[in-house]
Image: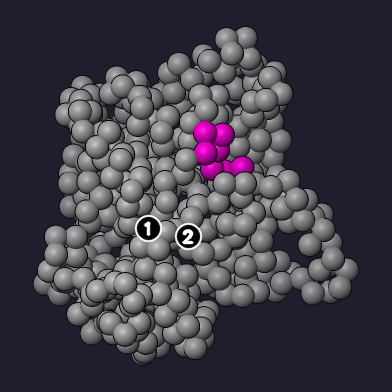
Amino acid sequence: MSDVIITGYETHDIRFPTSLTGDGTDAMNVDCDYSSAYLTLKTSSPDLKGFGMTFTIGRGNDIVCQAIHNVADRIVGKGVEDLFADMGKTWTHLTADSQLRWIGPEKGVIHIATGAVGNAIWDMYARSRSKPLWKLVVDMTPEELVRSTTFRYITDVITPEEALKWLKEKEASKAEREEKVRQLGYPAYVTSVGWLGYSDEKVLQLTKEAVAKGFNHFKMKVGSDLESDLRRGKLIRSVIDDPQYLPKDRDPQDPKSPGLRGKNAGPAGAVLMIDANQVWDVNQAIEYTKGLVEIKPWFIEEPTAPDDILGHATIRKALKPYGISVATGEHAHNRMVFKQLLQAEAIDVCQVDSVRLAGVSEVLAVLLMAAKFGVPVCPHAGGVGLCEHVIHLSLIDYIAVSGTMERNVLEFADHLHEHYVNPCTINERGRYNVPDDPKEGYSGEMYAASIVEYEWPNGSYWRERKAAGTLPRSVI
């Protein structure tokens, strides 16, 4: 493939009407139309393409698509093998346009657009080697993995030399961990039971179904009304703490076992987490979360503004006596924010996002920093296409970087997987199955029929809705 070059690209503004069913609703985001700013990279070889995306919740998705054009222009005409040979250098090239950088730098629309392009290159790289992305990365030598990572602005916390030493220490036991996770699957938690717009009846029904499917960790949205949150939390606890709802072949777990210690697990070993999606000021976050002690949450996610490092540190310190941890990262827009969260001891759980950061090379930097600080990485995956991506990241973390999945859980939201050629799947233990199709790359390829139906504003679904006068309130 030495003579194969990037010849062009296509972008698609794809939007799904999830606001109609309340999927994705929380205290901050009340009308969510799960959307994908979707990219296909084309090459001079008709058999080689790369698929990338970033996630939005509707309006503004078109702006991200335009930004993707601006970033993708930088690699048109480049040889694919030259890009693959040093992915860290490729990442630097994507972020090095000084005029585009000015409207970041490394944050906002430009950064997530860069993530879509970077992810598409990684997807193409994996496809060219006939490996799913996680396998491509874990099969790299420590030297190759370090060369694929961006270290700019984080060498005060971890240097390439430190990372290389760390990865070499994990090298000898990678095969053993790979075999283990293939057999067991990767631990997951379910978010779909607790969207804020769901009725109590739906919450109960979905919670019972999730327990029956083997899930042991559950998350609910909070932040709009304390009394309502307590009621909903007790409803969820009434199911997950009652052994009668467990699958017949599964016994309750020991809340004091190593994987559950410190997670406020109930008598059946089930764990509940809560997510405020940034709605509170710092003192509000502390007082409101203390009001939810009765439902025994493991962590409060996004309790305040995502850029407020010291605010998160204050919240964590105040909630520690109540046994409640702090998690964030869904809207942490670059590796420097994660660096400071770790330095300030502001989080107990690192929630890296696969498409808010600028692609796999930047995610690798966060995985390495979190491993150094001993903070578990539990990626954010609420949204369209994110579950398909993040199982790859968690496998990379477990097999090649941190070497542990004992306390980790990867978010699973049961929405829109049917639109993907290689959808993620969950086994009977409530764990992600390991992606194993050599042609799936980063698992981000969407069916052409889904694009035709849901592309905004002229996809068949949206044209029919407009003609019928039944467009969702969120897009009117």
Read off the magenta span: 437-445
Q: Residue at x 35, y 82 (%)?
A: 245
Residue type, numbered disc 1: Arg
| Chief secondary structure of the magenta portion | loop
Viewer-proximal residue, 405 or 452?
A: 405
Residue depicted at x 31% and y 22%: 141
Q: Front-most of 143 and 285?
A: 143
Task: Provide the residue designation for mark 2.
Answer: 382
Image point 32% across, 68% down: which residue? 217
Give the left or right position of residue 17, taking residue 183 as reference.
right
Disc 1 packing (10 Å; few <14; some 14–19; many ≥20) = many
Q: Nearer the viewer, mark 1 or mark 2?
A: 1
The residue lying at 42 percent from left, 69 percent from top is: 213
Quarter of the N terminus within the rendering: top right
Residue ranking furthest to the right = 467
Is residue 385 rendered to the left or right of residue 400?
A: right
Q: Is residue 81 magenta?
A: no
Number of marks drawn: 2
Camera-side residue of 404 and 346: 404
Q: CA distance from mark 1 to mark 2?
A: 16 Å
